[in-house]
Amino acid sequence: MQIKEFMSKNVVTVGEDQSVLEVRNIMAEHNFRRVPVVDDIKRIKGILTAGDVGRATPSDASTLSKYEANYILGKLKIKDLMTKNVVTVKEDDEIERAAYLMYQNKFGVLPVVDADNKLCGIVADSDILKVFVDILGYATSSTKITIDVSDKVGVIADLGTIFKNRGVNIISVLSRAVGQQKKEVMIRADLTNAMDIIEEIRDAGYNITDISTIKVQK
């Protein structure tokens, strides 16, 4: 899954010669925490955050009047505050790369650029969450079966055969390590008319550690 499938293409941007006052108002209007800074051909030049603006804004304890403070912010340029070394992703990168960079750097948004470093979109944490929900199949009425598969080989093939023989489509399959010793597989499927498949899995020698069902209202 590539980032271009999930990113937002309509991006509000600012120029590095705009005033901090102007951009602060733009960010407030759209409730933005970050805004990309681009040149006249959309190449990414930097990024401005709400924290940058906050540090440049006189505090309430300042002796400056509101008008004096706004005058200062009106003279201050974005290029004086913005972060120039911007973490970006390419539109053809896998969505996992965006998720990793956002997690690693505690970002809520990442600019997406093309091969010429021109801004072509943004990917936000809400986009990552949507992908996560889609992968889990959580938006579909289904049952999740969690199976202990420690020290077993060929698990996916075995379990897949059980579901195939029953004519039950699998919505999602995920595996994960639990600590250093235990591994588990989580299978989500619509078992409305096939709950007895759980017993077939147990009869095949697998230990089911959890069963949970969700019903999605449409």
Image: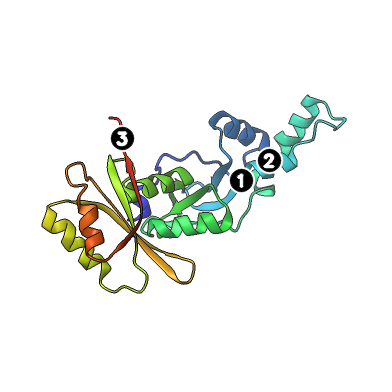
Marks 3 & 1, CB-CB < 8 Å contact: no
- At mark 1, the secondary structure is strand
- At mark 3, the secondary structure is loop
Residue identified by numbered label 3: 216
Label 3 crowd (10 A; few <14 / some 14-19 / many >=20) = few
Residue identified by numbered label 1: 48
| Sequence-first tag of 3 and 1 | 1
Q: Which marked residue is nearer to the observer: mark 3 or mark 2?
A: 3
Q: Amino acid at mark 1?
A: Leu
Q: Amino acid at mark 2?
A: Val
- Return the residue nearer the eye: 75 or 52: 52
Q: Which marked residue is nearer to the observer: mark 3 or mark 1?
A: 3
- At mark 2, the secondary structure is helix
Q: Amino acid at mark 3?
A: Val
CA–CA distance in space, label 3 to label 1: 40 Å
**Is residue 60 visible from the viewing direction of this image?**
yes
Question: x and y percent of residue 46 in the render?
Answer: 58, 51
Q: Is residue 123 above or below residue 165?
A: above
Quadrant placement of the C terminus: top left
Label of residue 53 in the image: 2
- Residue drawn 29% across the image and 64% down it: 206
Label 1 crowd (10 A; few <14 / some 14-19 / many >=20) = many
Quadrant placement of the N terminus: bottom left
**Is residue 87 visible from the viewing direction of this image?**
no
Marks 1 & 2, CB-CB < 8 Å contact: yes
